[in-house]
Amino acid sequence: GEEHQGCWLGIGFLPDETGNLIVKRIVPGGPADKSRRIMQGDILHRVDGVPVTGLDHSDVALMLLSAGSNSAALTLYSPRVGTYDVTMQKQWGGALPGGGGGGGAGPPS
């Protein structure tokens, strides 16, 4: 299974055999790390209220990318605390292939 890099939120997911998206990696200093709530092994349930269980993780990546404007509301399940919601600010810039949106060349001269 190919690990999906959700770079804009600083999370790497890996689907398990039942179609759950498991948090495998948390990028230090990224939005997920700063939330202090998401841990490796947690399961992603919803993105902006839409269930993602069983979806292809590339589809989920698109949902994360298009969710909200500058933030994404995620519902996850943790063996430690049960189901919880977390809203994270997206990080744009060099994290995305193609550089992501944002930042023009400045005012025309």
Image (cartoon, helix red, strand yellow):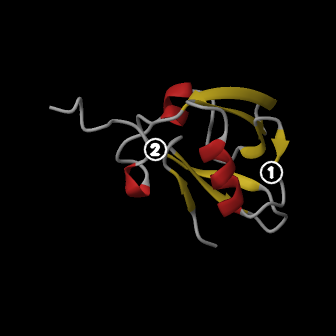
Relative height, residue 65 to residue 68 (above, below): below
Q: Quadrant of residue 57?
A: bottom right
Find residue 52 and name its label: 1
Q: Amino acid at mark 2?
A: Val
Q: Secondary structure at mark 1?
A: loop
Which residue shows up at 70% across the image and 54% down it?
A: 60
Disc 2: which residue: 27
Residue 18 x/y as whole percent: 85, 64
Q: Quadrant of residue 108?
A: top left
Left or right, 70 with reference to 84: left
Which residue shows up at 73% across the image and 55% down it?
A: 21
- Residue at far front of view: 109
Q: Amino acid at mark 1?
A: Val
Crowding at dot 2, Cα within 10 Å, few <14 / some 14-19 / many 20+, comes out as some
Split into 4 quadrants, where in the image is the C terminus? top left
Q: Quadrant of residue 56?
A: bottom right
Pointer 1 and pointer 2: residues touching (CB < 8 Å)?
A: no
Left or right, 55 with reference to 57: right
- Residue at far left of view: 109
Seen from the viewer's position, the closer of residues 63 and 79 is 63
Question: Could you tell me how far apart the alpha carbons at marks 1 and 2 are, in whole angstroms?
Answer: 22 Å
Q: Earlier in the sequence, mark 1 or mark 2?
A: 2
Find residue 92 and name its label: none
Q: Secondary structure at mark 2?
A: loop
Residue 59 x/y as whole percent: 70, 59
Crowding at dot 1, Cα within 10 Å, few <14 / some 14-19 / many 20+, comes out as some
Left or right, 14 with reference to 103: right
Which residue shows up at 50% across the image and 33% down it?
A: 31
Nearer the observer: mark 1 or 2; the answer is 1
Relative height, residue 57 to residue 36 (above, below): below
